[in-house]
Image: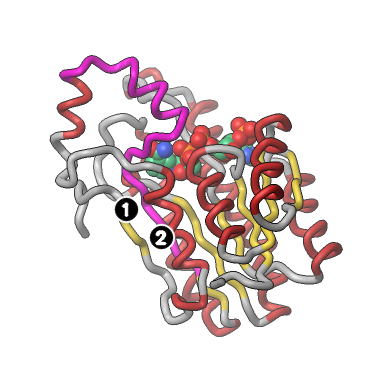
Amino acid sequence: MRFKNKIAVITGASSGIGKATATLLAKEGSTVVLNARKEEQLEAVAAEIARNYTSPLVIRGDICEALTLDRLVQKPLEQFGRIDIWINNAGGGAPAKPLEQITMTEWNEILNRNLSSVFRCCQKVATVFKQQQYGRIVNVSSLAGRDKSLLAGVDYSASKAGLIGMTRHLAALLASDNITVNTVAPGATLTERIAQRWSTLSPEAQQKIIDTIPLGRLGKPEDIAPAIAFLASDEASYITGAVIDVNGGCFMS
Ligand SMILES: NC(=O)c1ccc[n+]([C@@H]2O[C@H](COP(=O)([O-])OP(=O)(O)OC[C@H]3O[C@@H](n4cnc5c(N)ncnc54)[C@H](OP(=O)(O)O)[C@@H]3O)[C@@H](O)[C@H]2O)c1
C-alpha cells in the first residue's frame, strides 16, 4: 500500500487519465479528493471508488475559477489536516484549427485552462506543502508539449510545453522544502473524448498515426496512471523536475 494515509487531490478526475489515476491511488491506500465540473460523472466515479476503496471527498467546480481552487485546498485541510499529493490533470484542447483561424480569445482560453490554472494550483498548494515540509506535485503535460503534434493545435502545444518549463522552475524553487514537482507527458490516449475524435478519422488516417508509434497502438488511461502514481510516491523522492514520456516510443528524449 504505497499511499496508505496519504491525501491526494486529482483535478479532472471524472474521466480518462484523471479517473484512472484517482482509482489507482485509491486502490493503493490513498484517500482521494476528486475535482471536475460536471456533477453526474464526478459522483459516479466517486461512488465507484467508495464501493471498492475509501470514500473520496468530492469538490466540484472549474479549476480556472479562484473559488474552486480555494475550496480544493481548504476542504481537505479542514477534513484531513493535510494534503500530500496534488495531481494537475484537468485540461485539454480543441481539434487543431488552421493557424490563421485561431483567435486570441481561443488562445487565452487554452493557456488559461492548461497552464495558468496549474500555476495558480501550484502557487496555492506550495504554501501548504512548505508548512508541512512535504509534498508531491505531478503535472500532466502532453506529447504535444515535447514534439510536433498531429492532432492538437499550436495553442495546446504551447500550453503543454509551458507546463514543462514551469515544472522545472518550480522543482528548483521548492526542492529545499522537500517538495517534488514532476511531469508526465502522455501520447495520444484512448479516453472517451479521444475515442470519439478517433472514430471520425478514416482508417487510412488512423493507420498513419499508428505507424508513428513504435509500440503500434494508442495509449490507454491505465498506461498513464502508473507513471503519475510513481512520481507521486515516496519511491520517487529523489526525482524532481523530470518529465516521463508515456507515448509508445513515438518521441524519445
Ligand atoms: N487523452 C489524450 O490523448 C491526452 C494526451 C496527452 C495529454 N493529455 C492530457 O491529459 C489530461 C487528461 O486528459 P484526458 O484525455 O484524460 O481528458 P478527459 O477524458 O477529457 O477528462 C478531462 C477531465 O478534466 C475535467 N475538466 C476539464 N476541464 C476542467 C476544468 N476547467 N476544471 C475542472 N475540471 C475540468 C473533465 O470533467 P468536466 O468536463 O466535468 O470538468 C474530466 O474529468 C489533460 O490535461 C490532457 O491535456 C491527454
Left or right position of 224 against 177: left
Q: Is residue 186 magenta?
A: yes
The residue at which mark 1 appears reads as: 246
Residue behind mark 2 = 227
- Provide residue 104's location: percent of width, then percent of height: 50, 28
169 with respect to 220 (left or right): right
Across and down, in percent, residue 89 comes to 53, 48
How far, Cα to Cα, is label 1 from label 2? Answer: 8 Å
Residue at the spot 48% in from the left edge and 32% down from the top edge: 107
Element under disc 2 = helix
Q: Is residue 202 left or right of residue 78?
A: left
Instruction: Name the kind of residue labelled 2 in the image.
Output: Ala
Comes first in the chain, label 1 or label 2: 2
Magenta residues? 181-204
Please tell me how crowded label 1 is: few (under 14), some (14-19), or many (20+) other residues with Cα within 10 Å: many
| Number of on-image labels | 2
Q: Quadrant of the C terminus?
A: bottom left
**Would you place residue 234 above or below residue 222 in this image?**
below
**Residue 158 occupies quadrant:** top left
Q: Tell me what residue is drawn at x 28 percent, y 38 percent.
A: 218
State yes or no: discs 1 and 2 in contact (Cβ < 8 Å).
Answer: yes
Q: Position of residue 204 (x, y in %)?
A: 16, 19
Is 109 left or right of 4, judged from the image as shown? left
Residue 158: in sight, yes or no?
A: no
* Element class at badge 1: strand
Kindly identify the amino acid type of the residue bearing the numbered disc 1.
Answer: Val
Work out whether residue 233 can be spotted.
Answer: yes
Toward the front, the furthest residue is 52
**Is ligand 1 less than 8 Å from the beta carbon at label 2?**
no
